[in-house]
Amino acid sequence: MLIPRATRAATLAACATLLLASSACGNDETNEATTTSVRLYGTDSTMLNSFPAELGDRANLVDGMKGTTPLTPLPEEFKDRLLSIEPDLTSFIYAAEAYDAVLISALAAQLAGTTDPAAFAAQIVGVTNGGQRCETAVDCLALARDGQDIEYRGISLSRGGFTAAGEPSTASYATLHFDGTQINDAKTEFVGAGFESSASSTPPPETGAADEDAEGPLVLGGLLPQTGALVLSHPPLAAGAALAIQEINAAGGVLGSPVTWIDGDDGTDPVVAKATVASHAAAGVHVIIGAGASGVSRAVLPDVVQAGMVLFSPSNTEASLTDLDDEDRYFRTAPSDNLQGRALADVILRDGPQQVAIVARQDSYGEGLQEIVRSELEQAGIDAGRITLNTYQPPEGAEAATVDFTSVVREIKETGSDAVVIIGFNESAGLIRALADAGVSLRR
């Protein structure tokens, strides 16, 4: 459902007013309690069933942790299809976005009548707006082969189409709760955000139907976190992409040929990702699916554009990516953090925090989302003095243990924070351990 901004703001402001009024009556004992007892909140990179494993034998420290992630209520039959690809999946986060990114790319190439990236990139936004609505690879590809304009509505892209910037106009967010070391699906709630009216109404360039492309098959290359700080997100991303490739080819492929997939690692590291992009360019890749992290996509996009390819991410959420100078070669099925920040602020305010610490990676994703959450909390009535912002230098590669959270934990205790919002990747487990080692009780 869509929540009107005015209604939401009024509700949160009233909530915040009550919370601040009650906190003003506190005493030294209350302040001491908040110094040693906090609630944890996470985002899409930590609210995963695989995340507690990062804590080893202290996995139960996540018990009670809450957070948000871009997530559409997934049909059970879609989950079953994913599990047929990867039976060991423990999370489906961004699987639908990966599936849709691959299928939209295929539909755009079929409509353009060519695998020339410049030509089919111009069709991508239009694939999701106007035309005859379709929802499956079989139906959509059949329409595209006939040269009909289509409006794709898939798993993650269920309501509004893309904006002119090539990203979702609407989104669905899930509020997730850890019970013990697993997310309790029974407590998951879904909330809508964004406006369908912000979708592009500009029609795509006219094309003629084509049965085949003389340049050969459509080639997609992965730029997904097989290693590095986002490795926990790789299984559902890879499964979603693989399922789409399988179903596209079962439906007859694109322009008369099966779609080809070439694996590739982004390493959650620009150096690794740039090497993969160069390899894909040499192999004749047309569309790169990735990167996993927003900062990595930002770093490699100039290389992608120079090589004449398209970059299409299922999981980039950094808000400022909307305004990239991308020469119309960058797209994403994941929604902007402008929307996630509002959803996360709602979750935090429900618990009545007196002092909020927002701890974020010192990069464009972490600091960007941190600022959005701060702004949303303040707009809801939380005084700026009750919000503390902390950042840390993210680790290189997979060396999450190298982050020293001592000063961050000290400030959390000194300010009496009773809510700690963690905006990070797998290194966030180090912060949770550091809080527990410092005698901070992690509340449910």
Image (cartoon, grey):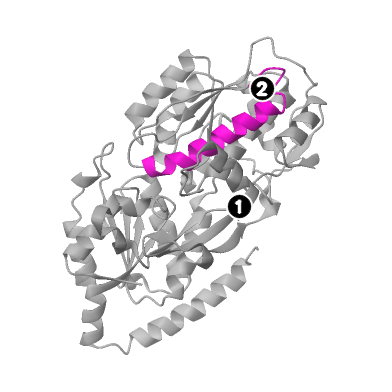
What kind of element bears circle 2? Answer: helix
For the residue marked with disc 2, what is the amino acid?
Answer: Ala
- Locate residue 224, reporting x and y percent: 44, 34
Q: Nearer the viewer, mark 2 or mark 1?
A: 1
Would you say residue 242 sits in the magenta stretch? yes
Q: What residue did someone put label 1 on? A: 74
Q: What residue did someone put label 2 on? A: 119
- Locate residue 226, reporting x and y percent: 39, 34
User: Relative to residue 421, is residue 301 depicted above or below?
Assistant: above
Question: Which quadrant would the N terminus be assigned to in this image?
Answer: bottom right
Residue 116 seen in the current view: yes
For the residue marked with disc 1, what is the amino acid?
Answer: Leu
- Locate residue 282, reporting x and y percent: 46, 13
The residue range painted magenta reads: 231-258
Where residue 58 sits, quadrant-wise, is bottom left
Q: Which mark is residue 406?
A: none
Tell how many labels.
Answer: 2
Task: Give the class, few, some or many, for how many residues have Cα within 10 Å of label 2's Cα (few <14, many ≥20).
Answer: some
Picture residue at 16% right of the left edge, 58% below the top: 406
